[in-house]
């Protein structure tokens, strides 16, 4: 059993300081992954990788019902937390662009105008649809896109073969592309 898994079991037993120890052990890896995610986000210049990791930590440490079981589950939850943070920020930026709290003015003659939607929001909608089809594929996409894990890292953390992970990745990409078109 890995050290991370042992610490996560201690968290389940009530030792909340062990969650801090988990983050200390994987902080550099999470920061590298967060930097890669932010580099791929268009227009996201106000959030640093450090801030994204810290916000993810706060989100995970605040979830009292969260029962992290092993390294794979931890990274899956961290990826989901990063996704939620980026989606929330994209929505807030979109709201600010469109007047924020101002009362909307409807223009019936402007039906053909398409408002620009940030890509992360489109991906979030597609991931929610993918979750309805296959939750494991959604988790794989989150690990790849939001946690930045390679297929080999996903295979290692999940205990599956690289070939089966690659096959699932191809299927998930095809489903996402179909949904986003």
Image: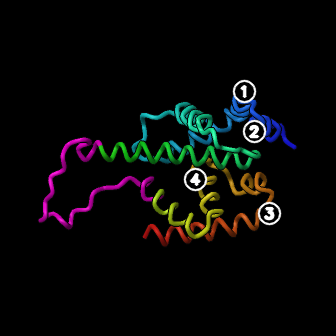
Q: Which residue is mark 2?
A: 12
Q: Secondary structure under badge 4?
A: helix
Callout 2 environment at 10 Å: few (<14), some (14 to 19), or many (20+)? some
Nearest the camera: 120 or 134?
134
**Residue 137 spot, x, y in % from top left:** 63, 64
Q: Which residues are magenta?
A: 96-123
Q: Residue at x 20, y 67 (%)?
A: 112
Q: Is residue 40 visible?
A: yes
Callout 4 environment at 10 Å: few (<14), some (14 to 19), or many (20+)? some
C-alpha gap between disc 3 and disc 1: 34 Å
Q: Residue at x 43, y 41 (%)?
A: 44
Q: Main secondary structure of the magenta part?
A: loop
Q: Which residue is mark 3?
A: 161
**Residue 88 spot, x, y in % from top left:** 43, 45
Earlier along the polypeptide chain: callout 2 or callout 1? Answer: 2
Earlier along the polypeptide chain: callout 3 or callout 2? Answer: 2
Occupied quadrant, residue 154: bottom right
Nearest the camera: 180 or 103?
103
Q: Is residue 24 visible?
A: no
Earlier along the polypeptide chain: callout 4 or callout 3? Answer: 4
Q: Secondary structure under badge 2?
A: helix
| Labelled pair 4, 3 in contact (Cβ < 8 Å) | no
């Amino acid at each position: 059993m890995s050290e991370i898994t042992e610490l996560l079991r201690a968290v389940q037993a009530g030792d909340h300081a062990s969650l801090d120890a988990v983050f200390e052990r994987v902080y550099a890896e999470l920061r590298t992954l967060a930097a890669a995610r932010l580099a791929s986000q268009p227009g996201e210049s106000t959030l640093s990788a450090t801030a994204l990791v810290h916000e993810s930590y706060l989100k995970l440490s605040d979830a009292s019902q969260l029962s992290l079981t092993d390294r794979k589950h931890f990274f899956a939850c961290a990826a989901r937390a990063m996704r939620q943070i980026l989606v929330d920020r994209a929505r807030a930026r979109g709201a600010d662009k469109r007047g924020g709290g101002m009362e909307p003015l409807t223009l019936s003659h402007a039906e053909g105008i398409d408002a620009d939607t940030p890509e992360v929001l489109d991906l979030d909608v597609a991931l929610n649809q993918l979750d309805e089809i296959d939750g494991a594929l959604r988790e794989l996409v989150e690990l790849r896109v939001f946690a930045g894990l390679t297929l080999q890292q996903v295979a290692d953390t999940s205990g599956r073969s690289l070939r089966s992970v690659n096959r699932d990745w191809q299927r998930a990409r095809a489903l996402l592309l179909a949904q986003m078109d």
